[in-house]
Image (spheres, rainbow, N blue to C red):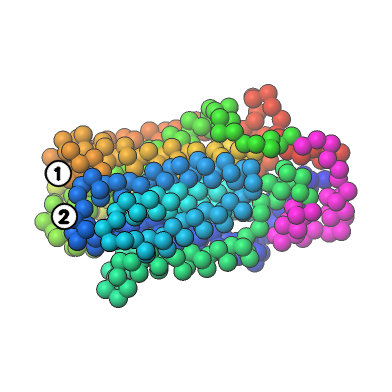
Amino acid sequence: MYSSILAKLDQARLNRNHFKMIFAAVLGDMLEFFDYFIMGFVLAFIIVPWKLNYLESSIILLSAGIGAMLGSFVFGMLADRFGRRNIMIITILTFSLASGAMYFTPEGWWGYLTLFRFIVGFGVGGLYSVSLTLIQEVVPSRYRGRISGIVTAFIPIGSLMGSLSAGYLSDIVGWRGLFLLTLLPALLVIFIRISWVPESPRWLLSRGKYDEAIKTVSRFTYLDEQDKKTLHNSKPISLKTKSKTRFLDVFKYPRSLIVSWGVNLGSQTAYYGIGLWGPAILALVLKLSPTEAAKMYIFVSLGGFVGRWFFSFISEWLGRKATGFITCVAGGILTILAGIFHSSFIGGTSVMWLLLIATYFFIDGAFTIVGPYSSEVWPSHIRATGMGSAYGFGGLGKIIGPLGLALIAGATNVVSPKATIDAVVPAFIFLGSLVIIGGILFLFGHETNKRSIEEIDAMVMKGKGQKEPAAVTESSF
């Protein structure tokens, strides 16, 4: 029966095929954000020779963020309809080819750059949403939290790769060559993912593709001949999964919607806002050059990387809700304290700098919960759609963050408002409060820790007067 087959998948020990899939996911997510962030470094090379004004440079910067918001919505729905693996490969092709196309940007054609920058964001937003969904539907539930967290933990390395490439290779390959650097490894990832990453067996079963499902399950666990015979002989009575996924279906699950959308908005707004002003405020307070402030910010980023690894494992112990609450609330409080004590020193060391390191430990760590949790809390038939909608809605933080900072600072530049000492306290209170609200929302969500996908489906559907939409057989659940 299908329930026993999926139970074997959920009870399996991690084998080489699990690790190959995890490696492919880590590599893909790391390189997608390498693609995503490289534009920020390229802009520094072209803004003067191209004589870009504020409006033109702002449109270039915003295009990828808008693309990511739309891509997460669109590709999430497509993944529920056509399969996780197929759409995942399409998303990688989308952003890698678009990034490579920017190599051919005619001199001064910022509109061409903006168009393909939008397409890069469109693909990146889709891959993040679909990749996590696929990973969660394959790995055993007892490992799902830490593995999903580890996949997201390597995302900051993509940004680091961008800074290193711009700093050490731009003189050799030029700014156009930086785009080719993003293209080559992305194509390698496509090959790896085609070879190492199978389709979700749960999605295959929901579509009645039983032979393909059993082949996938066999890669991750041992199936004896009786198991295979049972699956092959099970004849479907009905197939209740909808052939078409509608975006409006996410509104049928208000608890999942409010929590996942809210925590994404709060965390992304705070993270983007702090990243926008943090280095500049350090430079002002410590009277440092931007280069020196950037070097100090390496330790802040390192704190975030450690936090992502730490909370990937802690979520398996404390649970998703408790860990999400702790990371967001602690990160929000530390953000507020960093603003209040921005001009204080302990033994000649900036208190704000120390608090920012601690802040990133928690807020960056929160993303190892926010992303995976936003996929877990939806029923299987709209899991990728729900995940994409949450991540896409959270992308509004890239607009709300700078806009809020601009209003507080009284600046006219709403994309990258200039940091001022007078605005530090209210600005950091604003950012910290948003992420605290996100943390509180976690308390109202479903607890998904150590529950199988089927148990989560039943929990989310409970009270809706609906049964789990899955293939039903004579010997099935």
Q: Quadrant of the N terminus?
A: top right
The answer to which of 322 and 246 lies nearer the viewer is 246
Q: Badge 1, how many Cα within 10 Å: few under 14, some, many 20+?
A: some
Q: How many labels, in total?
A: 2
Q: Which secondary structure lies at badge 1?
A: loop
Residue in the image at 70% along x and 60% along y: 220
Horizontal side of residue 365 vs 73, given as left or right: left
Q: Is residue 451 visible?
A: no
Q: Which secondary structure lies at badge 2?
A: helix
Question: Does the stretch in magenta take in 233?
Answer: yes
The residue tagged 1 is 420
Residue in the image at 13% along x and 40% along y: 422
Considering only vertical position in the picture, is 235 above or below 291? above
Horizontal side of residue 110 vs 305, given as left or right: left
Amino acid type, label 2:
Ala
Considering only vertical position in the picture, is 179 above or below 254? below
Q: Quadrant of residue 409?
A: top left
Q: Quadrant of the C terminus?
A: top right
Residue in the image at 55% along x and 43% along y: 76
Q: Quadrant of residue 439?
A: top left
Instruction: Give the farthest residue toward the bottom.
Output: 172
Question: Does the stretch in magenta take in 321?
Answer: no
Q: Earlier in the sequence, mark 2 or mark 1?
A: 2
Residue in the image at 29% along x and 56% along y: 109
Amino acid type, label 1:
Thr
Label the magenta part by its dominant secondary structure: helix
The residue tagged 2 is 283
Considering only vertical position in the picture, is 193 above or below 322? below
How far apart are the two marked residues, 2 and 1, measured between alpha carbons?
11 Å
Magenta-tinted stretch? 211-239
